[in-house]
Image (spheres, rainbow, N blue to C red):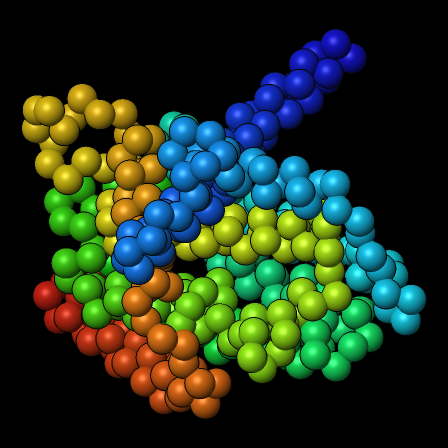
Amino acid sequence: MPEYFSIIFLETYKILFLLVPVLVSVALIVWLDRRIWAFVQKRRGPNVVGPFGLFQSLADALKYVFKEIIVPASSNKAIFVLAPIVTMTLALIAWAVIPFSETLVLSNINVGILYLFAVSSLGVYGIIMGGWASNSKYPFLGAIRSAAQMISYEISIGVIIINVLLCVGSLNLNDIVLAQKKVWFIIPLFPMFVIFFISALAETNRPPFDLPEAEAELVSGYQTEYSGMMYAMFWLGEYANILLMCAMGSILFLGGWLAPIEIFPFNLIPSALWLVLKILFLFILFALVKAIVPRYRYDQLMKLGWKIFLPLSLTWVVLTASYLFYFNLLPVI
């Protein structure tokens, strides 16, 4: 029995060791997001609460904690409360398979990429539940639009992942990273990286694809009836998903924890720090897009996903498979 409790304690410690940095990172990237927008638009951004405004996210979090949670009388209360919990939980459990080095990973499963794709795809359920349970037409319309958007671009992301798997021959995230020791996949698969990046913007409801939360059309989309910590949980899940997409992009195309060149002084930097820097680089690109690119119309969004990205990614799968087969480069499983 003591051994059983020690195992539980060890696993709990591992989970907290992963989740606490993720939650802290969410607060920091919200600050970074605002600072980048301010820089692009020649504003100051957060600069009052704490040094350089670093505690602004903490102040916002405290505001959500103390604000009243209002549950509409006509809503389905059980599902209404469950929706933000589902959204936040799915965003956090996906980090269980993200490898920060060859050994620093909570769960090194052989189907890690399939697990990531499955968990990120389930995120649509939290949004649908929130919009439907509110029993209001605006949240419901926002949820339907968001579901259609996420499902449309998940297909493109799935096909893009197939290109990487053809080059690796494994669903294990460690194997995907180690396969990029000679060359990062961003070089031979650069068009797929661009489509993945844009699809990740749409998957996480980021501008220019933030149509479910567009102020003019849908008030605040599926979040209209939410307040206090329940609203904050949706917000937390959204930013955790953004970081997750940046982590996926880093692992699939930027060599994960691998250094650009295995020479001094690059080889002195810890592996985990390389992955963090790559995630940060992709997030900065996310923030720049939000500050620069105007919002798409919904018909433009659907056309881009179904008529441009899907055919392109399918064509690239055929080209990648043909090239690997012709030159006898297909991995041996």
Residue 105 point in image, percent of width and height: 45, 33
Q: Is residue 189 left or right of residue 299?
A: left
Residue 160 appears in the picture as rendered: no
Residue 321 in the figure: left or right of residue 110: left
Q: Position of residue 277 (x, y in %)?
A: 28, 39
User: Toward the viewer: 161 or 71?
Assistant: 71
Q: Residue at x 33, y 79 (%)?
A: 309
Reply above or below: 133 against 185: below
Snapshot quadrant of residue 129: bottom right
Q: Nearer the viewer, residue 36 or 316?
A: 36
Which part of the image, by quadrant, shows the N terminus? top right
Tell me where residue 141 sits by quadrant: bottom right
Residue under the image location 11 percent in, 36 percent down: 261
Q: Is residue 320 visible?
A: yes
Q: Residue at x 91, y 66 (%)?
A: 73
Locate residue 150, reporting x and y percent: 52, 72
| Extreme residue in the top direction | 2
Name the residue at 46% across, 30% down: 50
Please identify the quarter of the rendering in which residue 308 is found. Answer: bottom left
Residue situated furthest right in the rendering? 73
> How many numbered callouts?
0
Residue 171 vs residue 213: left or right?
left
15 versus 184 height, above or below: above
Question: What is the x, y in percent for residue 311?
Answer: 32, 84
